[in-house]
Image (spheres, rainbow, N blue to C red):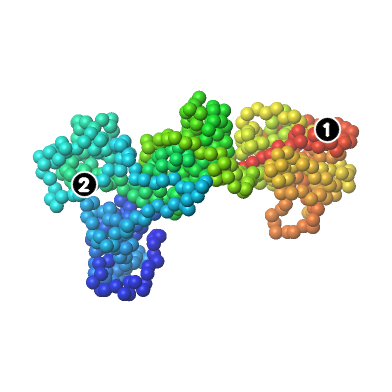
Protein backbone atom coordinates (compact mmCIF):
# COMPACT_ATOMS: atom_id res chain seq x y z
CA UNK A 1 0.00 0.00 0.00
CA UNK A 2 2.82 2.38 0.82
CA UNK A 3 5.78 3.15 -1.38
CA UNK A 4 7.65 5.04 1.35
CA UNK A 5 7.58 2.80 4.42
CA UNK A 6 11.22 2.94 5.48
CA UNK A 7 12.12 5.55 8.08
CA UNK A 8 15.16 6.85 9.77
CA UNK A 9 14.68 5.17 13.15
CA UNK A 10 17.64 6.87 14.75
CA UNK A 11 16.38 10.31 13.76
CA UNK A 12 12.96 9.55 15.21
CA UNK A 13 14.43 8.45 18.50
CA UNK A 14 16.43 11.64 18.76
CA UNK A 15 13.40 13.84 18.10
CA UNK A 16 11.67 15.57 20.98
CA UNK A 17 8.28 14.39 22.16
CA UNK A 18 7.03 17.84 21.20
CA UNK A 19 7.91 17.37 17.48
CA UNK A 20 5.00 18.01 15.12
CA UNK A 21 4.30 14.76 13.26
CA UNK A 22 1.56 13.00 11.29
CA UNK A 23 0.16 9.48 11.07
CA UNK A 24 0.63 8.36 7.45
CA UNK A 25 -2.17 5.94 6.51
CA UNK A 26 -2.37 5.72 2.71
CA UNK A 27 -0.49 6.57 -0.50
CA UNK A 28 -1.82 6.83 -4.06
CA UNK A 29 -0.04 7.24 -7.45
CA UNK A 30 -2.36 9.79 -9.09
CA UNK A 31 -4.33 12.94 -8.37
CA UNK A 32 -7.67 11.28 -9.11
CA UNK A 33 -6.89 8.40 -6.76
CA UNK A 34 -5.75 10.68 -3.91
CA UNK A 35 -8.84 12.88 -4.25
CA UNK A 36 -11.08 9.81 -3.87
CA UNK A 37 -8.99 8.58 -0.93
CA UNK A 38 -9.16 11.93 0.86
CA UNK A 39 -12.93 12.13 0.50
CA UNK A 40 -13.31 8.56 1.73
CA UNK A 41 -10.98 8.99 4.71
CA UNK A 42 -12.46 12.36 5.69
CA UNK A 43 -15.88 10.72 6.00
CA UNK A 44 -14.43 8.14 8.41
CA UNK A 45 -11.73 9.97 10.40
CA UNK A 46 -10.85 13.41 11.77
CA UNK A 47 -7.73 15.52 11.12
CA UNK A 48 -7.35 14.21 7.56
CA UNK A 49 -4.69 15.88 5.37
CA UNK A 50 -3.33 15.35 1.89
CA UNK A 51 0.34 15.78 0.96
CA UNK A 52 2.44 15.50 -2.18
CA UNK A 53 5.19 12.92 -1.49
CA UNK A 54 7.24 13.36 -4.68
CA UNK A 55 7.79 11.16 -7.76
CA UNK A 56 4.10 11.38 -8.67
CA UNK A 57 2.83 9.95 -5.35
CA UNK A 58 0.38 11.47 -2.87
CA UNK A 59 -0.29 10.60 0.76
CA UNK A 60 -3.18 10.70 3.24
CA UNK A 61 -2.10 11.57 6.78
CA UNK A 62 -3.77 12.36 10.10
CA UNK A 63 -2.57 15.26 12.20
CA UNK A 64 -0.71 17.31 13.02
CA UNK A 65 0.06 15.82 16.45
CA UNK A 66 2.82 15.87 19.01
CA UNK A 67 4.79 12.65 18.78
CA UNK A 68 3.20 11.33 21.97
CA UNK A 69 -0.33 12.02 20.69
CA UNK A 70 0.54 10.52 17.32
CA UNK A 71 1.73 7.29 18.90
CA UNK A 72 -1.47 7.08 20.96
CA UNK A 73 -3.64 7.75 17.89
CA UNK A 74 -1.68 5.21 15.83
CA UNK A 75 -2.11 2.46 18.44
CA UNK A 76 -5.79 3.22 18.98
CA UNK A 77 -6.82 3.35 15.33
CA UNK A 78 -4.78 0.26 14.48
CA UNK A 79 -6.43 -1.65 17.32
CA UNK A 80 -9.87 -0.57 16.07
CA UNK A 81 -9.01 -1.67 12.54
CA UNK A 82 -9.76 1.80 11.18
CA UNK A 83 -6.35 2.32 9.56
CA UNK A 84 -3.97 -0.14 7.87
CA UNK A 85 -1.52 -2.10 9.98
CA UNK A 86 1.41 -0.61 8.05
CA UNK A 87 0.48 2.97 8.98
CA UNK A 88 3.38 4.88 10.52
CA UNK A 89 4.47 8.19 12.03
CA UNK A 90 5.82 10.70 9.50
CA UNK A 91 7.61 14.02 9.89
CA UNK A 92 7.46 17.21 7.81
CA UNK A 93 10.58 16.07 5.96
CA UNK A 94 8.57 13.19 4.45
CA UNK A 95 6.34 15.62 2.53
CA UNK A 96 7.02 18.13 -0.22
CA UNK A 97 3.85 20.19 0.16
CA UNK A 98 0.29 20.07 1.44
CA UNK A 99 -2.46 19.67 -1.16
CA UNK A 100 -5.55 19.26 1.08
CA UNK A 101 -7.41 20.98 2.69
CA UNK A 102 -6.93 23.59 -0.03
CA UNK A 103 -5.09 26.69 1.13
CA UNK A 104 -3.83 25.09 4.37
CA UNK A 105 -0.06 24.74 4.91
CA UNK A 106 0.91 22.95 8.12
CA UNK A 107 4.50 22.25 7.11
CA UNK A 108 7.10 24.55 8.61
CA UNK A 109 9.32 26.50 6.28
CA UNK A 110 12.37 24.62 7.58
CA UNK A 111 10.79 21.26 6.70
CA UNK A 112 9.83 22.20 3.15
CA UNK A 113 12.07 20.41 0.67
CA UNK A 114 14.03 22.74 -1.62
CA UNK A 115 13.99 21.35 -5.13
CA UNK A 116 17.59 20.76 -6.35
CA UNK A 117 18.70 22.18 -9.65
CA UNK A 118 18.57 19.73 -12.49
CA UNK A 119 21.88 17.90 -12.66
CA UNK A 120 23.46 17.97 -16.08
CA UNK A 121 26.22 15.77 -17.52
CA UNK A 122 29.81 16.91 -17.64
CA UNK A 123 30.27 19.54 -20.32
CA UNK A 124 32.39 18.41 -23.23
CA UNK A 125 33.16 19.35 -26.78
CA UNK A 126 30.47 17.06 -28.29
CA UNK A 127 28.20 16.11 -25.40
CA UNK A 128 27.67 19.37 -23.53
CA UNK A 129 24.09 19.42 -22.23
CA UNK A 130 21.49 21.95 -23.28
CA UNK A 131 20.89 24.97 -21.08
CA UNK A 132 17.86 24.73 -18.81
CA UNK A 133 16.00 27.90 -17.90
CA UNK A 134 12.66 28.70 -16.36
CA UNK A 135 9.69 28.33 -18.74
CA UNK A 136 8.02 31.34 -20.25
CA UNK A 137 4.60 30.00 -21.24
CA UNK A 138 2.00 32.44 -22.50
CA UNK A 139 -0.71 30.08 -23.71
CA UNK A 140 -3.52 30.15 -21.11
CA UNK A 141 -4.46 26.52 -21.64
CA UNK A 142 -1.01 25.35 -20.60
CA UNK A 143 0.19 28.17 -18.35
CA UNK A 144 1.38 27.04 -14.93
CA UNK A 145 -0.46 29.78 -13.05
CA UNK A 146 0.82 30.42 -9.54
CA UNK A 147 -2.29 31.00 -7.41
CA UNK A 148 -2.31 34.10 -5.21
CA UNK A 149 -1.92 33.78 -1.47
CA UNK A 150 -5.39 33.20 0.03
CA UNK A 151 -6.67 35.87 2.35
CA UNK A 152 -7.49 35.20 5.97
CA UNK A 153 -11.21 35.72 5.33
CA UNK A 154 -13.02 35.06 2.07
CA UNK A 155 -14.46 37.88 -0.03
CA UNK A 156 -18.03 38.98 -0.30
CA UNK A 157 -19.66 38.66 -3.76
CA UNK A 158 -19.06 42.41 -4.35
CA UNK A 159 -15.38 42.08 -3.37
CA UNK A 160 -15.08 38.96 -5.53
CA UNK A 161 -16.41 40.85 -8.57
CA UNK A 162 -14.01 43.70 -7.89
CA UNK A 163 -10.98 41.39 -7.67
CA UNK A 164 -12.20 39.48 -10.75
CA UNK A 165 -12.33 42.75 -12.72
CA UNK A 166 -8.57 43.17 -12.17
CA UNK A 167 -7.75 39.84 -13.89
CA UNK A 168 -5.91 39.96 -17.21
CA UNK A 169 -7.34 38.31 -20.29
CA UNK A 170 -4.90 35.39 -19.99
CA UNK A 171 -5.86 34.91 -16.34
CA UNK A 172 -9.56 34.82 -17.24
CA UNK A 173 -8.90 32.33 -20.04
CA UNK A 174 -6.82 30.19 -17.66
CA UNK A 175 -9.79 29.96 -15.30
CA UNK A 176 -12.00 28.77 -18.17
CA UNK A 177 -9.39 26.14 -19.06
CA UNK A 178 -9.28 24.96 -15.44
CA UNK A 179 -13.09 24.80 -15.29
CA UNK A 180 -13.11 22.85 -18.54
CA UNK A 181 -10.49 20.44 -17.17
CA UNK A 182 -12.58 19.98 -14.01
CA UNK A 183 -15.58 19.00 -16.16
CA UNK A 184 -17.79 22.04 -15.48
CA UNK A 185 -17.26 24.19 -18.61
CA UNK A 186 -18.00 23.06 -22.16
CA UNK A 187 -17.77 26.37 -24.03
CA UNK A 188 -15.09 28.16 -26.01
CA UNK A 189 -11.96 29.52 -24.32
CA UNK A 190 -12.64 33.19 -25.01
CA UNK A 191 -11.88 34.86 -21.62
CA UNK A 192 -15.44 36.18 -21.57
CA UNK A 193 -17.40 35.35 -18.42
CA UNK A 194 -20.86 34.90 -19.88
CA UNK A 195 -23.78 32.72 -18.82
CA UNK A 196 -21.98 29.43 -19.57
CA UNK A 197 -18.88 30.40 -17.61
CA UNK A 198 -20.92 31.69 -14.66
CA UNK A 199 -22.93 28.46 -14.60
CA UNK A 200 -19.77 26.37 -14.62
CA UNK A 201 -18.32 28.46 -11.78
CA UNK A 202 -21.46 27.86 -9.72
CA UNK A 203 -21.26 24.14 -10.47
CA UNK A 204 -17.62 24.00 -9.35
CA UNK A 205 -18.45 25.99 -6.18
CA UNK A 206 -21.24 23.63 -5.25
CA UNK A 207 -19.08 20.55 -5.86
CA UNK A 208 -16.35 22.01 -3.63
CA UNK A 209 -18.64 22.98 -0.75
CA UNK A 210 -18.82 26.71 -1.52
CA UNK A 211 -21.89 28.90 -1.92
CA UNK A 212 -22.83 28.69 -5.65
CA UNK A 213 -22.77 32.41 -6.47
CA UNK A 214 -21.28 32.04 -9.96
CA UNK A 215 -18.47 34.46 -9.04
CA UNK A 216 -15.22 32.96 -7.78
CA UNK A 217 -13.48 34.66 -4.89
CA UNK A 218 -9.72 35.08 -4.82
CA UNK A 219 -9.38 32.03 -2.56
CA UNK A 220 -11.65 29.96 -4.80
CA UNK A 221 -9.71 30.93 -7.91
CA UNK A 222 -6.54 29.84 -6.13
CA UNK A 223 -8.17 26.55 -5.16
CA UNK A 224 -9.38 25.85 -8.71
CA UNK A 225 -6.01 26.66 -10.28
CA UNK A 226 -4.26 24.65 -7.59
CA UNK A 227 -6.36 21.62 -8.51
CA UNK A 228 -5.62 22.17 -12.19
CA UNK A 229 -1.86 22.50 -11.74
CA UNK A 230 -1.44 19.78 -9.11
CA UNK A 231 -1.18 17.16 -11.85
CA UNK A 232 2.12 18.74 -12.96
CA UNK A 233 3.69 18.70 -9.49
CA UNK A 234 7.10 17.10 -9.64
CA UNK A 235 7.32 17.30 -13.44
CA UNK A 236 9.87 20.13 -13.28
CA UNK A 237 8.69 21.81 -16.47
CA UNK A 238 11.53 24.04 -17.63
CA UNK A 239 12.55 25.68 -20.91
CA UNK A 240 15.56 23.87 -22.42
CA UNK A 241 17.70 25.76 -24.94
CA UNK A 242 20.07 23.62 -27.01
CA UNK A 243 22.18 25.60 -29.51
CA UNK A 244 23.62 22.39 -30.99
CA UNK A 245 20.15 21.14 -31.89
CA UNK A 246 18.84 24.62 -32.74
CA UNK A 247 15.81 23.96 -30.55
CA UNK A 248 14.21 25.60 -27.53
CA UNK A 249 11.27 23.88 -25.82
CA UNK A 250 9.78 23.02 -22.45
CA UNK A 251 10.91 19.64 -21.10
CA UNK A 252 9.73 17.80 -17.92
CA UNK A 253 13.16 17.98 -16.30
CA UNK A 254 11.75 16.58 -13.07
CA UNK A 255 11.47 13.13 -14.69
CA UNK A 256 14.03 13.18 -17.55
CA UNK A 257 17.52 14.56 -18.06
CA UNK A 258 19.87 14.99 -21.02
CA UNK A 259 22.15 11.96 -21.48
CA UNK A 260 23.72 11.99 -24.96
CA UNK A 261 23.66 13.02 -28.61
CA UNK A 262 23.07 10.26 -31.17
CA UNK A 263 22.33 12.09 -34.46
CA UNK A 264 19.70 13.04 -35.33
CA UNK A 265 18.58 12.84 -31.68
CA UNK A 266 19.36 14.42 -28.34
CA UNK A 267 18.33 11.88 -25.71
CA UNK A 268 16.61 12.80 -22.44
CA UNK A 269 16.21 9.63 -20.37
CA UNK A 270 14.18 8.83 -17.26
CA UNK A 271 15.64 9.78 -13.89
CA UNK A 272 13.13 8.13 -11.53
CA UNK A 273 10.13 5.86 -11.29
CA UNK A 274 8.23 7.34 -14.24
CA UNK A 275 9.50 5.59 -17.43
CA UNK A 276 9.35 8.73 -19.55
CA UNK A 277 11.62 9.71 -22.43
CA UNK A 278 12.11 12.80 -24.58
CA UNK A 279 13.97 13.11 -27.87
CA UNK A 280 14.87 16.31 -29.68
CA UNK A 281 15.21 15.79 -33.45
CA UNK A 282 17.57 17.90 -35.56
CA UNK A 283 19.26 17.20 -38.91
CA UNK A 284 19.88 18.72 -42.30
CA UNK A 285 17.97 17.21 -45.22
CA UNK A 286 15.23 17.39 -47.81
CA UNK A 287 11.84 15.79 -48.31
CA UNK A 288 13.44 12.38 -48.93
CA UNK A 289 15.30 12.67 -45.63
CA UNK A 290 12.08 13.61 -43.84
CA UNK A 291 10.20 10.67 -45.36
CA UNK A 292 13.09 8.34 -44.52
CA UNK A 293 12.99 9.49 -40.89
CA UNK A 294 9.22 8.87 -40.88
CA UNK A 295 9.78 5.27 -42.02
CA UNK A 296 12.69 4.59 -39.66
CA UNK A 297 10.85 5.92 -36.61
CA UNK A 298 8.12 3.33 -37.16
CA UNK A 299 10.64 0.48 -36.76
CA UNK A 300 11.66 1.65 -33.27
CA UNK A 301 10.52 0.05 -30.02
CA UNK A 302 9.48 3.47 -28.68
CA UNK A 303 6.87 3.79 -31.47
CA UNK A 304 4.34 0.94 -31.11
CA UNK A 305 2.68 -0.01 -34.41
CA UNK A 306 -0.86 0.95 -33.35
CA UNK A 307 -1.93 4.58 -33.32
CA UNK A 308 -2.74 7.44 -35.72
CA UNK A 309 -0.03 8.79 -38.01
CA UNK A 310 0.04 11.40 -40.75
CA UNK A 311 2.68 12.36 -43.31
CA UNK A 312 2.43 15.60 -45.27
CA UNK A 313 4.76 17.11 -47.85
CA UNK A 314 6.93 18.87 -45.27
CA UNK A 315 5.98 17.34 -41.89
CA UNK A 316 4.78 14.22 -40.13
CA UNK A 317 3.14 13.14 -36.89
CA UNK A 318 3.47 9.65 -35.41
CA UNK A 319 1.50 8.37 -32.43
CA UNK A 320 2.28 4.89 -31.13
CA UNK A 321 0.04 3.26 -28.53
CA UNK A 322 0.45 0.03 -26.58
CA UNK A 323 -0.59 -1.32 -23.19
CA UNK A 324 2.75 -0.09 -21.84
CA UNK A 325 3.54 3.28 -23.48
CA UNK A 326 2.15 6.08 -25.63
CA UNK A 327 4.62 7.96 -27.81
CA UNK A 328 4.11 11.13 -29.83
CA UNK A 329 6.57 12.25 -32.52
CA UNK A 330 6.30 15.29 -34.73
CA UNK A 331 8.86 16.78 -37.12
CA UNK A 332 8.86 19.33 -39.92
CA UNK A 333 11.15 20.46 -42.73
CA UNK A 334 12.03 24.17 -43.10
CA UNK A 335 14.93 25.73 -44.99
CA UNK A 336 16.70 22.42 -45.42
CA UNK A 337 16.52 21.51 -41.73
CA UNK A 338 14.36 18.84 -40.08
CA UNK A 339 13.47 19.51 -36.46
CA UNK A 340 10.99 18.06 -34.01
CA UNK A 341 10.64 15.99 -30.88
CA UNK A 342 9.33 12.75 -29.37
CA UNK A 343 7.60 12.31 -26.01
CA UNK A 344 7.33 8.77 -24.61
CA UNK A 345 5.04 8.40 -21.59
CA UNK A 346 3.60 5.45 -19.64
CA UNK A 347 0.12 4.36 -20.78
CA UNK A 348 -2.78 5.12 -18.48
CA UNK A 349 -1.49 8.53 -17.36
CA UNK A 350 -3.27 10.52 -20.06
CA UNK A 351 -3.92 13.67 -18.06
CA UNK A 352 -0.27 14.38 -17.34
CA UNK A 353 0.83 13.18 -20.77
CA UNK A 354 -1.52 15.45 -22.69
CA UNK A 355 -0.76 18.45 -20.46
CA UNK A 356 2.99 17.99 -20.87
CA UNK A 357 2.65 17.36 -24.62
CA UNK A 358 0.70 20.61 -25.02
CA UNK A 359 3.43 22.48 -23.13
CA UNK A 360 6.06 21.01 -25.43
CA UNK A 361 4.11 21.75 -28.61
CA UNK A 362 3.34 25.36 -27.69
CA UNK A 363 6.88 26.12 -26.55
CA UNK A 364 8.75 24.42 -29.43
CA UNK A 365 10.94 27.03 -31.14
CA UNK A 366 13.49 26.70 -33.93
CA UNK A 367 16.75 28.57 -33.38
CA UNK A 368 19.97 28.82 -35.35
CA UNK A 369 21.98 25.65 -35.48
CA UNK A 370 21.48 22.04 -36.49
CA UNK A 371 22.99 18.89 -34.97
CA UNK A 372 26.35 17.88 -36.43
CA UNK A 373 26.02 14.33 -37.88
CA UNK A 374 29.26 13.43 -36.03
CA UNK A 375 28.11 14.77 -32.63
CA UNK A 376 28.33 12.14 -29.91
CA UNK A 377 29.56 9.51 -32.38
CA UNK A 378 31.08 6.42 -30.77
CA UNK A 379 32.34 3.02 -31.79
CA UNK A 380 29.43 1.07 -30.27
CA UNK A 381 27.32 -0.36 -33.09
CA UNK A 382 24.45 -2.83 -33.17
CA UNK A 383 22.02 -4.08 -35.78
CA UNK A 384 19.35 -3.73 -33.09
CA UNK A 385 19.92 0.01 -32.60
CA UNK A 386 19.24 3.13 -34.65
CA UNK A 387 20.89 6.27 -33.25
CA UNK A 388 20.92 4.73 -29.79
CA UNK A 389 17.27 3.60 -29.98
CA UNK A 390 16.22 -0.03 -29.94
CA UNK A 391 14.49 -1.38 -33.03
CA UNK A 392 11.09 -2.90 -32.35
CA UNK A 393 11.45 -6.68 -32.28
CA UNK A 394 8.94 -9.54 -32.14
CA UNK A 395 8.35 -11.63 -29.03
CA UNK A 396 9.11 -14.79 -30.98
CA UNK A 397 10.06 -15.75 -34.53
CA UNK A 398 9.88 -19.18 -36.14
CA UNK A 399 9.58 -20.63 -39.63
CA UNK A 400 6.61 -21.38 -41.88
CA UNK A 401 6.03 -22.31 -45.52
CA UNK A 402 3.55 -21.49 -48.29
CA UNK A 403 0.99 -24.17 -49.08
CA UNK A 404 -1.09 -22.49 -51.79
CA UNK A 405 -0.89 -19.74 -54.42
CA UNK A 406 -2.79 -17.26 -52.21
CA UNK A 407 -0.09 -17.26 -49.57
CA UNK A 408 -1.59 -19.55 -46.90
CA UNK A 409 1.18 -20.62 -44.51
CA UNK A 410 1.71 -23.65 -42.28
CA UNK A 411 3.77 -23.13 -39.13
CA UNK A 412 4.22 -24.42 -35.60
CA UNK A 413 1.36 -23.61 -33.20
CA UNK A 414 3.81 -22.35 -30.57
CA UNK A 415 4.67 -19.21 -32.53
CA UNK A 416 1.08 -17.91 -32.71
CA UNK A 417 0.06 -18.33 -29.07
CA UNK A 418 -0.93 -15.15 -27.17
CA UNK A 419 0.13 -12.81 -29.98
CA UNK A 420 -1.22 -9.32 -30.35
CA UNK A 421 -0.17 -9.42 -33.99
CA UNK A 422 1.20 -12.10 -36.35
CA UNK A 423 3.30 -11.28 -39.40
CA UNK A 424 4.69 -13.14 -42.38
CA UNK A 425 8.10 -11.87 -43.48
CA UNK A 426 7.66 -8.94 -41.00
CA UNK A 427 5.59 -6.97 -43.53
CA UNK A 428 2.32 -8.89 -43.94
CA UNK A 429 -0.15 -9.35 -41.11
CA UNK A 430 -1.89 -12.70 -40.83
CA UNK A 431 -4.62 -14.44 -38.84
CA UNK A 432 -4.90 -18.01 -37.59
CA UNK A 433 -7.21 -19.85 -40.02
CA UNK A 434 -7.03 -23.32 -38.42
CA UNK A 435 -5.09 -25.23 -35.78
CA UNK A 436 -4.24 -28.81 -34.88
CA UNK A 437 -3.23 -28.47 -31.20
CA UNK A 438 -2.60 -32.20 -30.83
CA UNK A 439 0.11 -32.15 -33.48
CA UNK A 440 1.26 -28.55 -32.85
CA UNK A 441 0.36 -27.15 -36.29
CA UNK A 442 -1.25 -23.80 -37.20
CA UNK A 443 -2.50 -22.53 -40.56
CA UNK A 444 -2.18 -18.79 -41.24
CA UNK A 445 -4.19 -16.69 -43.68
CA UNK A 446 -2.48 -13.42 -44.76
CA UNK A 447 -4.72 -10.36 -44.65
CA UNK A 448 -3.45 -9.39 -48.11
CA UNK A 449 -3.28 -11.84 -51.00
CA UNK A 450 0.35 -12.85 -51.57
CA UNK A 451 2.09 -14.35 -54.61
CA UNK A 452 4.63 -16.95 -53.43
CA UNK A 453 7.58 -17.88 -55.62
CA UNK A 454 7.05 -21.55 -54.71
CA UNK A 455 4.48 -23.54 -52.74
CA UNK A 456 4.82 -26.89 -51.02
CA UNK A 457 4.27 -29.98 -53.14
CA UNK A 458 3.47 -32.79 -50.69
CA UNK A 459 4.98 -36.24 -51.22
CA UNK A 460 2.47 -39.05 -51.61
CA UNK A 461 3.35 -42.23 -49.76
CA UNK A 462 6.14 -42.84 -47.26
CA UNK A 463 9.74 -41.95 -47.98
CA UNK A 464 12.52 -44.52 -47.81
CA UNK A 465 14.11 -44.93 -44.37
CA UNK A 466 17.65 -43.56 -44.09
CA UNK A 467 17.06 -41.37 -47.14
CA UNK A 468 18.49 -37.83 -47.15
CA UNK A 469 16.26 -34.97 -45.95
CA UNK A 470 16.74 -31.25 -45.41
CA UNK A 471 14.90 -28.72 -43.25
CA UNK A 472 14.51 -25.17 -44.57
CA UNK A 473 14.28 -22.62 -41.77
CA UNK A 474 15.16 -19.25 -40.29
CA UNK A 475 17.61 -20.82 -37.88
CA UNK A 476 18.53 -17.50 -36.23
CA UNK A 477 15.10 -15.87 -36.15
CA UNK A 478 15.55 -13.81 -39.31
CA UNK A 479 18.94 -12.29 -38.44
CA UNK A 480 20.46 -13.66 -41.66
CA UNK A 481 17.60 -12.35 -43.79
CA UNK A 482 17.11 -15.64 -45.65
CA UNK A 483 16.38 -19.28 -44.77
CA UNK A 484 19.13 -21.88 -44.58
CA UNK A 485 19.11 -25.65 -45.09
CA UNK A 486 20.00 -28.19 -42.40
CA UNK A 487 20.72 -31.67 -43.75
CA UNK A 488 19.99 -35.01 -42.10
CA UNK A 489 18.26 -38.36 -42.64
CA UNK A 490 14.84 -39.96 -42.12
CA UNK A 491 15.28 -42.38 -39.20
CA UNK A 492 11.73 -43.65 -38.58
CA UNK A 493 8.19 -43.15 -39.85
CA UNK A 494 6.85 -43.09 -36.28
CA UNK A 495 7.48 -41.22 -33.05
CA UNK A 496 9.25 -42.70 -30.04
CA UNK A 497 5.94 -43.98 -28.67
CA UNK A 498 4.78 -45.37 -31.99
CA UNK A 499 2.86 -42.25 -33.11
CA UNK A 500 1.94 -42.72 -36.76
CA UNK A 501 1.54 -39.04 -37.62
CA UNK A 502 5.13 -38.18 -36.69
CA UNK A 503 8.47 -38.99 -38.29
CA UNK A 504 11.81 -39.15 -36.49
CA UNK A 505 14.75 -37.39 -38.11
CA UNK A 506 18.49 -37.55 -37.61
CA UNK A 507 19.53 -33.90 -37.85
CA UNK A 508 20.40 -30.97 -35.58
CA UNK A 509 18.10 -28.02 -36.27
CA UNK A 510 18.09 -24.78 -34.28
CA UNK A 511 15.15 -23.31 -32.40
CA UNK A 512 14.20 -20.93 -35.20
CA UNK A 513 13.84 -23.82 -37.70
CA UNK A 514 10.65 -25.08 -36.02
CA UNK A 515 7.71 -24.86 -38.44
CA UNK A 516 9.94 -25.23 -41.49
CA UNK A 517 9.29 -27.73 -44.32
CA UNK A 518 11.11 -31.07 -44.28
CA UNK A 519 12.15 -31.84 -47.86
CA UNK A 520 13.44 -34.94 -49.61
CA UNK A 521 16.24 -34.78 -52.16
CA UNK A 522 13.73 -33.94 -54.91
CA UNK A 523 12.26 -30.94 -53.06
CA UNK A 524 9.04 -32.75 -52.10
CA UNK A 525 7.62 -31.90 -48.66
CA UNK A 526 7.68 -34.84 -46.24
CA UNK A 527 6.37 -32.89 -43.27
CA UNK A 528 6.88 -29.91 -40.93
CA UNK A 529 9.62 -29.70 -38.30
CA UNK A 530 8.38 -29.64 -34.70
CA UNK A 531 10.04 -27.71 -31.88
CA UNK A 532 11.78 -29.73 -29.12
CA UNK A 533 9.32 -31.31 -26.69
CA UNK A 534 8.84 -29.44 -23.42
CA UNK A 535 8.20 -32.52 -21.29
CA UNK A 536 11.44 -32.42 -19.32
CA UNK A 537 13.11 -35.18 -21.34
CA UNK A 538 16.59 -34.61 -22.75
CA UNK A 539 17.03 -36.54 -25.97
CA UNK A 540 20.39 -37.41 -27.55
CA UNK A 541 21.84 -34.86 -29.94
CA UNK A 542 20.73 -35.16 -33.53
CA UNK A 543 17.17 -36.29 -32.75
CA UNK A 544 14.28 -34.25 -34.16
CA UNK A 545 10.65 -34.87 -35.08
CA UNK A 546 8.31 -33.75 -37.85
CA UNK A 547 4.56 -33.90 -38.47
CA UNK A 548 4.24 -36.02 -41.62
CA UNK A 549 2.77 -34.87 -44.92
CA UNK A 550 -0.47 -36.89 -44.61
CA UNK A 551 -1.35 -35.24 -41.27
CA UNK A 552 -0.68 -31.79 -42.72
CA UNK A 553 -2.80 -32.48 -45.78
CA UNK A 554 -5.77 -33.55 -43.64
CA UNK A 555 -5.63 -30.21 -41.76
CA UNK A 556 -5.42 -28.29 -45.03
CA UNK A 557 -8.28 -30.25 -46.61
CA UNK A 558 -10.52 -29.62 -43.59
CA UNK A 559 -9.69 -25.88 -43.90
CA UNK A 560 -10.64 -25.86 -47.60
CA UNK A 561 -7.09 -25.37 -48.88
CA UNK A 562 -6.18 -27.15 -52.12
CA UNK A 563 -2.63 -28.42 -52.05
CA UNK A 564 -0.11 -29.38 -54.72
CA UNK A 565 0.86 -33.04 -54.94
CA UNK A 566 4.39 -34.13 -55.87
CA UNK A 567 4.83 -36.51 -58.79
CA UNK A 568 8.15 -38.07 -57.86
CA UNK A 569 10.52 -35.80 -59.72
CA UNK A 570 14.25 -36.14 -60.14
CA UNK A 571 16.81 -35.54 -57.43
CA UNK A 572 17.79 -31.87 -57.28
CA UNK A 573 21.28 -30.46 -57.12
CA UNK A 574 22.04 -28.69 -53.82
CA UNK A 575 21.74 -25.22 -55.39
CA UNK A 576 18.35 -26.12 -56.98
CA UNK A 577 17.08 -27.59 -53.71
CA UNK A 578 18.15 -24.45 -51.85
CA UNK A 579 16.37 -22.19 -54.37
CA UNK A 580 13.16 -24.24 -54.23
CA UNK A 581 13.19 -24.26 -50.42
CA UNK A 582 13.86 -20.51 -50.18
CA UNK A 583 10.90 -19.77 -52.47
CA UNK A 584 8.41 -21.44 -50.14
CA UNK A 585 9.94 -20.73 -46.70
CA UNK A 586 8.85 -17.67 -44.72
CA UNK A 587 9.62 -15.99 -41.40
CA UNK A 588 6.65 -16.02 -39.01
CA UNK A 589 6.74 -13.54 -36.11
CA UNK A 590 4.63 -12.97 -33.01
CA UNK A 591 4.37 -9.38 -31.71
CA UNK A 592 2.94 -7.98 -28.49
User: Which mark is drawn over residue 148?
Assistant: 2
Q: For this view, does 117 lie left or right of residue 576?
A: left
Q: Is residue 434 above or below residue 1?
A: above
Please tell me how crowded label 1 is: few (under 14), some (14-19), or many (20+) other residues with Cα within 10 Å: some
The percent position of residue 590, horizontal first and vertical second, equals: 62, 42
For disc 1, the marked residue is 566
Nearest to the observer: residue 136 or residue 57: 136
Whole-angstrom CA distance, mark 1 to mark 2, is 85 Å
> Of helix, strand and loop, which one carries label 1?
loop
Picture quadrant where residue 198 is located: top left
The percent position of residue 111, horizontal first and vertical second, equals: 28, 62
Residue drawn where x is 38% and y is 43% of the image = 239
Residue drawn where x is 41% and y is 42% of the image = 241
Picture quadrant where residue 188 is located: top left
Residue drawn where x is 73% and y is 33% of the image = 403
Q: Quadrant of the N terminus?
A: bottom left
The percent position of residue 276, horizontal first and vertical second, equals: 46, 47
Amino acid sequence: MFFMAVHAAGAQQAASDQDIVWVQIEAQPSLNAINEALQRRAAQLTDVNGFYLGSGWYGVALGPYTREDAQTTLRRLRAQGRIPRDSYIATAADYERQIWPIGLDQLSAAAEATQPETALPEQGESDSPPEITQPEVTQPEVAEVIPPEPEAADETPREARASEARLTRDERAALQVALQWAGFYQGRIDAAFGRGTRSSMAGWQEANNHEPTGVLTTKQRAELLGQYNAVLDGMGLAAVSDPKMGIEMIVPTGVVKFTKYEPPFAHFDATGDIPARVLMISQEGDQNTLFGLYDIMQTLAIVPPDGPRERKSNSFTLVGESARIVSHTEASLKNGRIKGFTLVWPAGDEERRTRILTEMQNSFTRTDGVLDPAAGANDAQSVDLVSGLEIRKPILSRTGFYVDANGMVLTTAGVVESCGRITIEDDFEADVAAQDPENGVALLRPRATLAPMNVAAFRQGPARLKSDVAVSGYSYGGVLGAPSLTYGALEDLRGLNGETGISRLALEPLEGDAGGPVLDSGGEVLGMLLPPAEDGRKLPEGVAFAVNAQTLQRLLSDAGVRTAVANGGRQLAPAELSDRAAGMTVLVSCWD
